[in-house]
Image: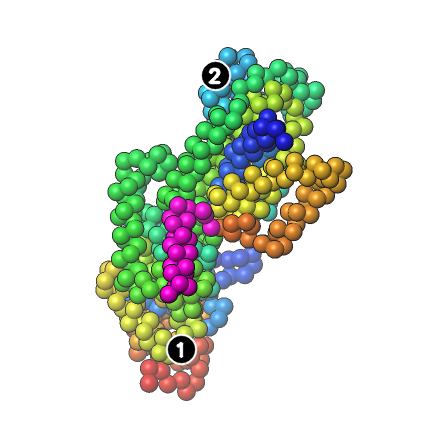
Amino acid sequence: MLELKNVTKTFGGLTAVEKVDFIVRKDSISGLIGPNGAGKTTIFNLITGIYKVTGGEIIFKGIPIQNLEPHRIAGMGITRTFQNIRLFKKLSVYDNILTACHRNAGYNLMESVLRLGRYKKEERNLRQDTEDLMEIMGLSKWRDHTAHSLPYGLQRRLEIARALAVKPELLLLDEPAAGMNPDETLQLMNLIREIRDRFKCTIFIIEHHMDLVMGICENIMVLNFGRKLIEGPPEMVQRDPQVIEAYLGEGAKLGA
Amino acid sequence: MDWFYIKGILILSGINLMAVLGLSLLTGFTGLFSFGHAGFMAIGAYTAATMGIKLGLPLIPSLLIGGLISGVISLFIGKLTLNLKGDYFCIATLGFGEAIRLILDNVQYFGGARGWPGIPLKIDLWNVAIINVVGILILINLINSRHGRNMIAVREEELAAKTIGIDTFKHKMISLFISAVYAGIAGGMVGYYTGFLQPKMFSMNKSTELTIIVIFGGIGSISGSVLGTLLLTALPEILRAFALWRLVAYGAAVIFIMISRPEGLMGGKEITLKGFIRLLNIRKRSGKAAEG
């Protein structure tokens, strides 16, 4: 579904990502791990068009997307969450999701100013979609709370809900479990699986919680100093001596 | 105080309000600061006056054409500057506003710096009120649509807005365009109210005044903009008793309110009919609770 081919990104003289190849298969949950500064978030920024690649290609459903604007890439069905949560802070939970539903309506500026034609019907649908999504994500209780007043775990959840409102085919999650305790992490794992099954979307995760990554990812890429160290299923990655040396550390007992 | 005087203040408020509404969309809802809106007012003012005097068009079409021309020019400015980040856009608009004023100072066709007298007086309380009501309704409808929500998303978190598929540049352009149309119409009304136009009327002071009103009323609130405009247009008149110290008192009043209510008068909230009814209900209930 998504294919990175020889992707390279340099900032001035610094090479952040170097010749990375990777394939995210449809309906899979894939993981991206590596030490801090390895270039994980940079890869997400390249996929979503926030950065332009220096070299190589990013192909989504057969179409090269590496030079498109971020909103176009989102329009094609790729969206994401951020490592440092980026919600519409002053808006309510409801408005955060409602705003993100905008692509499911097509009425134009004139119709919204004059409240004509499609406006009423489509707006009603948008509001229904929003209610449904809040219900599924367990956010209905916090409907009118402003986003920044929510506890951290719920803010993460809201950010995922907002991303789902775009009806993505590929959802990129950048450290969704950051700052969560083991219990919340477990809940999140279940949530991610549920999202994949219910929304039929492919998921690509950056995460440091090994329990989560090893628990739900089918395919994992390990990045170190901008280069791909290895990719493969969790069992293989955990045992790889290179990965243990660069990232996991000696004597790491994973998944135990 | 006689009615004629009060009416004058109300008309001036109405004219200011139109420009403030436009700026409120740009600054309050889209998060872009502009110090050049007097420039858009000037374009609207001179275009509308030309339409009326040289082409003999009636008031409303003249005002609309003034607004439109102002909007079209804003698209050029926007194309060039809206990719600039926050503060730089603000500086660019400042330069634009001053440039317009200086150009008009030197165009003899419009009377240059000496001004342009003899514009027919066609503005009264009624047409100002109607124009503003229409302006407010359009703005409310716009803000409660997907386009308005997208603009608010740009204000809140531009990067996140992009990743959920919002064309942020396009929405900034729409916001700037509408904002300039409003400012242009307001400018047109200035000419038809005072009967006289002079580039000096559209200096940076005017732009600053508009921005102050938007912030004073509360970012992201239309009712705040309305209240703010009424208060801040009337205030200098009420303060006439202070004579020389008038503008100092005005400044002090603004500073005092911004310190005591940094989020502005309305702080992003709106006065709505629903909210009013809810307030009454709460009053009633607490009254009953006290009785029981």
Q: Is residue B42 one of those drawn in magenta?
A: no
Q: Which stretch did the figure color magenta?
A: B269-292
Amino acid beneath label 1:
Asn
Q: Name which residue lies at 71% across and 38% down.
A: B241
Find residue B17 and report its horizontal and vertical position in percent. 53, 35
Task: State the residue position of label 2.
Answer: B58
Task: Classify mark 2: helix, strand or loop.
Answer: loop
Label 1 to label 2: alpha-carbon separation: 70 Å
Chain under numbered label 1? A
Instruction: Give the colour scheme of this rendering.
Output: rainbow
Residue B185, compared with residue A75, is above or below; it is above
Q: Nearer the viewer, residue B80 or A26?
A: B80
**As drawn, which residue projects farthest toward the right?**
B244
Q: Name which residue lies at 64% across and 47% down.
A: B254
Is residue A193 among the parts visible in the rendering? yes
Task: Classify mark 1: helix, strand or loop.
Answer: loop
In the image, taking residue B74 as reference, residue A193 lies left or right, namely left
